[in-house]
Image: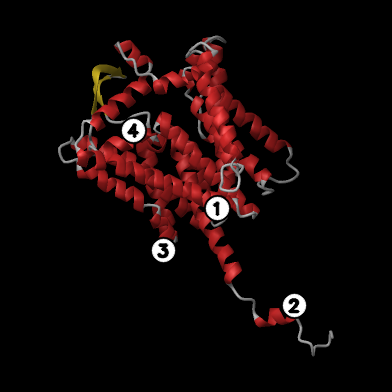
Amino acid sequence: MVGALFLLLVLQPFIGSGMTTVALVLLVICACFEAHFMIPKRAVSLLIIPAMMLVLGTAESASHSLRDVLKDYWYFIFPALSVFAGQMVARRIKRIEPILLAFVASGVVLSCWHLINFVAHRGSLGADDLNDIRSEVGSGYMLSAISPLILFLSGKFNISLLPARAKIVPIAIYCITISSVVLAMSRTITISLILSSIAGLGWLTAKRKGGLVIGGVVITAVLGLSAVLPEDVGTFLGKLARSREEVTFNNFNTTTDAIQYWRAYETLKGLQAYGDGNAVQKAVGLGFGKLVDIGFSVQLGATELREIPLFHNGYVYVLVKTGYVGLGLFFVYLAGFYIKGARSADSGIPEQQLVGGLTMAMTVTVLVSTFVIAGWFNPMTMCSVMLFIGTLMEFLEDVNVSRTVRIARPMPQNQLAAIHPSPSGSDH
């Protein structure tokens, strides 16, 4: 099962969304078969809120194209399927160390592939065409950021994943994966890695709130770069400087403005479409299959579009399709992951701190990425994150239950007598 998980993580970015969905279904079937189809309640509980959001999306979908409705169903089902698959796989593996190693190893493999492609394309395009290289080799892999994070937090909480003698291996892993993150020049991956590290260290819990200050400084610095740097999409710093305008720009006088600040423009059009709905539609959404008119036609590959089904801002996507009720449920769902992780991180037990820290880190990754690249609804980029959350949920539940049992179970009388002999015993 560990081997199957590793292969899925490595191949998923290359086999497409359809084959990834099939692979996840097969993984779930295999895990359920090995468990004699006895699905634990805690795994089923993770499907309750996604199922409620599906019901909301269906409420106003009757008048929309069946093809578009089915697409939205898939976008909402895929993340829940990934989390469920992760938990069922973890239930069969039973130990977290092999799972963490599978994620670390897959991150190293994908990072190596990205670095090889980068070097090959740089040699053919020239040293000054870094942005062109990025468009050729892609914007990197989220696993390249997850892999060093796992290694770092494992060391922080004294959980050994690698042999003590292999001191060069962690250094090599850090070098390969961090190099891939840097060369990917991805704002989302970079910022997610920084903020998830803060959360993973336990600095954003009820007991420790220092991470709020650090996270606020990071976000303020990124959004304030436009005041001191030119907005140049050809450089990483220039792209960072442009971040604020991409999410706040609202003066769309020309089509050029709309295309240049596309994230802000499509968000505006989505909110306008939602605002035009009646009271019921604002509560439950405009329904699956709803397309938003952007006001002009754009060429997307070989297809010309005037109406769009999905947004870079995943929160607007949820709002349009399922209304403020669905958006509230979505926040409750993600908050549930974070709260469980925070409780574990505050426990003082190293194993719980590691699992809890990783859970909070992955939740922050989802929160950040959903705002700018549809995150939770971006299956190709975020599949590994959602799978990881599912595996962590299984171990969070197991750790918490075992801890409760240890506290509540009374000590057998023979053991109690051995520790506290009676006054008439030979020791007195």
**Residue at image x 67%, y 49%?**
159
The kind of secondary structure element at disc 4 is helix
Q: Earlier in the sequence, mark 4 or mark 2?
A: 4
- Mark 1 lies on residue: 343
Q: Amino acid at mark 2?
A: Ile
- Mark 3 lies on residue: 36
Q: Earlier in the sequence, mark 1 or mark 4?
A: 4
The kind of secondary structure element at disc 1 is helix
Q: Earlier in the sequence, mark 2 or mark 1?
A: 1
Q: Earlier in the sequence, mark 1 or mark 3?
A: 3
The kind of secondary structure element at disc 2 is helix
Q: From mark 4 to mark 3, how far is it between C-alphas?
A: 40 Å
Q: From mark 1 to mark 4, how far is it between C-alphas?
A: 30 Å
Q: From mark 2 to mark 1, how far is it between C-alphas?
A: 33 Å
Q: Amino acid at mark 3?
A: His
Q: From mark 3 to mark 2, how far is it between C-alphas?
A: 42 Å
Q: Amino acid at mark 4?
A: Val
